[in-house]
Image (cartoon, rainbow, N blue to C red):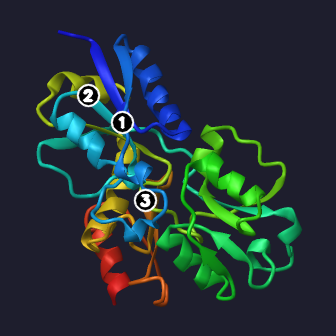
Amino acid sequence: MSKRITIGTRGSKLALWQANFVKDSLLSEGYEVEIEIIKTKGDAIQHLSFDKIEGKGFFTKELEDALLNNTIDLAVHSMKDLPTAMDDRLMIAGVSDRANPADWLIVRKEKLEKDKILKLREGAQVGTSSNRRKALLKHLRPDLQTKDLRGNVPTRLKKLTDGDSDAIVLAAAGLQRLEIDLSEFEVVKLHPREFVPAPAQGVLAYQINRDNARVRQAVQKIHHPEVARSTNVERTILKLLEGGCHLPLGAYCERDLMGYYHVWSAYAESVEEPLRNTFLSYNTTDGLAEAIVANLLN
């Protein structure tokens, strides 16, 4: 049986870090691994905000096509970018351990006002293309202005340095994985129980062909089942609300040492609508997502 595996990935620094992380994990298990870079619609279209790009899965479709065409064996995704509905011929065969799930607010130091919530001056402009982040910012500070922000992590930080906005919001996981020096900025670390992250934020998903038993066996060796249980709750909430990446929804599930699952969620029908928050604890994941959605909709 062949031990060669081809990983498909986007070409950004963060995507390549993620692919190489998986490559190293599989190499340690005795596999021969190569990486193939694939450009997605989301990478090609940089002048539009996410909600103006037609279709879903604009960071994943081309990778999924490569899987279906058998030009790659394994696609590595940021799980928060992966739609909950996928081709029946594909499956998520495993997930990584969870990195920091939080969002961080990166602020230009001259725009600070430390006695205010989020440490931002009145009417500050915050760069983000995420409707979830826009809704949470509006909920915490109605005076703030938001501005669409596209590009990879270094590009977004360069725009902040150049004065494109007063602050930006980025996922902590990406910043920490790339070991980016943020010393020129003030970093406001937002707690995931309060500024609720996207479903599965901080987790990598390993997608394969459903009938590829060889690669499925390989992926199982680097799979984290407890992380999968928590992210399944978060992604089920997203699926039940029939939302995509542009839905203003945060969902975060933690399991404590006693085995209880705690879920924080924030949802708005649109950026203009009021934010709804809910919290529940169960001793099982069974029915937990459904109960969260019922609370959010009622």
> Which is nearer the eye, 187 or 192?
187
Q: Amino acid at mark 2?
A: Ile
| Residue at x-position 44% and y-position 75% | 248
How much space separates mark 2 and mark 1, taking CA atoms?
A: 10 Å
Residue 206 in sight from this viewpoint:
yes
The quadrant in which residue 146 appears is bottom right
- The mark that comes first in sequence, 3 or 2, is 2
Mark 2 highlights which residue?
A: 72
How much space separates mark 3 and mark 1, taking CA atoms?
A: 40 Å
Q: Which mark is residue 38?
A: 1
List x then y, in percent, for residue 191: 63, 64
| Residue at x-position 22% and y-position 29% | 216
Would you call the spot at circle 1 few (<14 residues within 10 Å), some (14-19), or many (20 or more)? some
List x then y, in percent, for residue 135: 53, 79
Q: Which mark is residue 260?
A: 3
The quadrant in which residue 13 appears is top right
Identify the secondary structure beneath mark 1: loop
Q: Which mark is residue 244?
A: none
Q: Amino acid at mark 3?
A: Tyr
Left or right: where 74 falls relative to 213: right
Identify the secondary structure beneath mark 3: loop
Q: Nearer the viewer, mark 2 or mark 1?
A: 1
In the picture, which quadrant includes the N terminus?
Answer: top left
List x then y, in percent, for residue 81: 39, 54
